[in-house]
Amino acid sequence: MNIGIYPGSFDPITYGHLDIIARSAKLFDKLIVAVLSNPQKKPLFTVEERLEMIKESAKDIKNIEVDSFSGLLVDFARLKQARVIVKGLRAVSDFEYELQMALMNNKLDNKIETIFIMTSTKYSYLSSSIVKEVSRFGGCVKDLVPPIVEKRLRQKFNIK
Ligand code: PNS
């Protein structure tokens, strides 16, 4: 079975992430959406909340599995028998850090490849951080995140 893994913080999932999930799920028998559990990053949402929002947002995509991990991504990929890491690239500014991670992951396990999918231009300006910032101050994020995420953001920030 050809298994891919799409890792991220997903704090929270946006339409940009969902675009990458939908497109990359077509390339594999199974795509694992892997949520990094890293309390040092001080996430807005707990791992459980992030998993719930991804599962709800991507429920129409049948060949995905949503799971969380801590530690090294390559170790989790091996555990899940995934041989391909999928990353989204929005702009040139993403490239340097992504290249560094891809090379490091390849050094850690050269049987695991990283592939990059270009984010659709309509989402190229989008990031979880910017969504949180806009939402925190009451801005509308309806076109940027799935309905469940919009709802959870409003609950977090006590916005009516
Ligand atoms: O959504 P993000 O925060 O850009 O995702 C970053 C992520 C989760 C892909 C990255 O931080 C990661 O893979 N972390 C796991 C730790 C690890 O394997 N580090 C070595 C790779 S350089």
Image: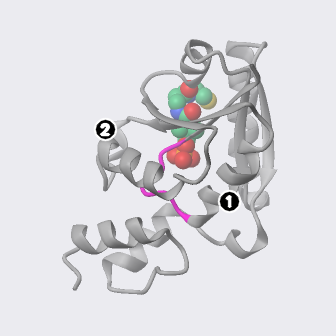
Q: Which residues are magenta?
A: 8-14
Residue 95 lies left or right of residue 151; in this view the side is right
Q: CA distance from mark 2 to mark 1?
A: 26 Å
Q: Position of residue 2 (x, y in %)?
A: 76, 23
Q: Which residue is mark 1?
A: 19
Residue 20 lies left or right of residue 34; in this view the side is right
Residue 9 colored in magenta in the image: yes
Placement of the C terminus among the 4 image quadrants: bottom left
The answer to whether residue 108 is above or below residue 92 is: above
Residue 18 lies left or right of residue 133; in this view the side is right
Q: Which numbered dot is residue 39?
A: 2
Dot placed on the residue nearer the N-terminal end, 2 or 1: 1
Numbered disc in front, either 2 or 1 = 1
Placement of the N terminus among the 4 image quadrants: top right
Judge: label 1 CB < 8 Å from ligand 1.
no
Assign ligand 1 to one image quadrant. Answer: top right
The image quadrant of residue 97 is top right
* Residue located at (73% from left, 16% from top): 107
The answer to whether residue 141 is above or below residue 123 is: below
Give whichever of 31, 6 is nearer the camera: 31
